[in-house]
């Protein structure tokens, strides 16, 4: 029994590690996933790795192709529209219902600060990572583990969409100040106004993603 539990933990850890690699941009759209190399890097068996990859395939982050193996998904316009539909459904209500003293507000502030530091270095991939963490923190205001899990999955898909863009500065720079404004508005106790700002932000973000030149 303990062996089964250990294997389950190993598969969960491997799944989380691979998902994190996608969110942080280490794995990009279309990248092949070589079992032998990945299993060695993660320190797991190939069977455990396959279990992790099946989980990520169900989440839409990996695709398996006959005679070609597995690769990281390349998002479509349809999938991106669906991601933003979910985000508009989940994120603004979190700002409306929580107060500025919620613990997740600290994570929002930290993410904004991280994005500003990364932008000053010209590290736009790190800016994208911090931006995703900002939005993850917003959903954290809801105190819902299920919503957290949903967002983890779609933000990983969103990072794949980011990875398909040739100029990450074009994609992320316009929204640095917006995150600051949303945060400051929320911290003043004006959750409804912050939510309205976020709704407009998400619409612009979706349009910007479609208008950005592909890599």
Image (cartoon, rainbow, N blue to C red):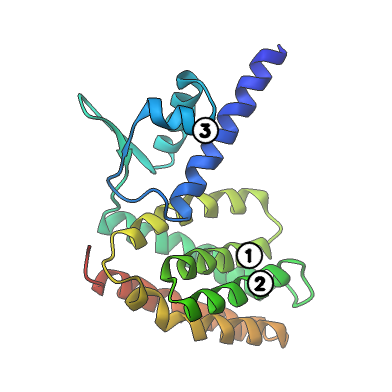
Q: State whether residue 159 is above or below residue 93.
A: above
- Which residue occupies 58% across, 33% down? 12
> Which part of the image, by quadrant, shows the N terminus?
top right
Residue 142 is situated, as x and y percent measured from the top left of the image, at 68, 62
Looking at the image, residue 47 sits to the left or right of residue 100; the answer is: left
The reply to whether residue 32 is in sight is yes
Q: State whether residue 53 is above or below residue 87.
A: above
Residue closer to the observer: 47 or 59: 47
CA gap, disc 2 and disc 3: 29 Å
Q: Residues within 10 Å of mark 3 (few under 14, many from 20)?
A: some
Residue closer to the observer: 50 or 203: 50
Give the number of the disc on residue 42. 3
Q: Nearer the viewer, mark 3 or mark 1?
A: 3
Q: For the residues labelled 1 and 2, say whether their Cβ atoms are less than 8 Å apart.
A: yes
Residue identifier under label 1: 137
Residue 173 is situated, as x and y percent measured from the top left of the image, at 41, 80
The reply to whether residue 199 is in sight is no
Q: Residues within 10 Å of mark 1 (few under 14, many from 20)?
A: many
- Which residue occupies 57% across, 64% down? 133
CA gap, disc 3 and disc 1: 27 Å
CA gap, disc 1 and disc 2: 10 Å
> Which part of the image, by quadrant, shows the C terminus?
bottom left
Q: Residues within 10 Å of mark 2 (few under 14, many from 20)?
A: some
**Is tag 1's residue or tag 2's residue first in the polypeptide sequence?**
2
Residue 159 is situated, as x and y percent measured from the top left of the image, at 41, 58
Residue closer to the observer: 81 or 35: 35
- Which residue occupies 64% across, 87% down? 185
Q: State whether residue 112 is above or below residue 61.
A: below
Q: Image quarter for residue 202?
A: bottom left
**Is tag 3's residue or tag 1's residue first in the polypeptide sequence?**
3
**What SS does tag 1 mark?**
helix
Residue closer to the observer: 85 or 175: 175
């Amino acid at each position: 029994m303990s062996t089964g539990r250990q294997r389950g933990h190993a598969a969960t850890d491997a799944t989380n590690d691979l998902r994190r690699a996608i969110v942080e941009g280490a794995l990009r759209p279309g990248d092949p996933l070589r079992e032998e190399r990945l299993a060695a890097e993660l320190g797991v068996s190939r069977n455990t790795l396959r279990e992790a990859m099946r989980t990520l395939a169900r989440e839409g982050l990996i695709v398996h192709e006959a005679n070609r193996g597995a690769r990281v998904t390349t998002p479509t316009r349809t999938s991106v529209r669906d991601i933003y539909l979910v985000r508009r459904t989940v994120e603004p209500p979190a700002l409306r219902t929580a107060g500025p003293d919620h613990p997740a507000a600290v994570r929002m502030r930290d993410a904004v600060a991280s994005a500003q530091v990364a932008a000053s270095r010209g590290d736009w991939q790190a800016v994208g990572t911090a931006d995703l963490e900002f939005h993850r923190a917003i959903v954290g205001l809801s105190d819902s583990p299920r919503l957290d899990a949903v967002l983890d999955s779609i933000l990983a898909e969103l990072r794949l969409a980011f990875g398909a863009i040739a100029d990450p500065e074009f994609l992320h720079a316009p929204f640095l100040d917006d995150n600051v404004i949303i945060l400051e508005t929320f911290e003043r106790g004006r959750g409804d106004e912050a939510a309205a700002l976020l709704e407009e932000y998400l619409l612009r973000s979706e349009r910007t993603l479609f208008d950005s030149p592909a890599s």
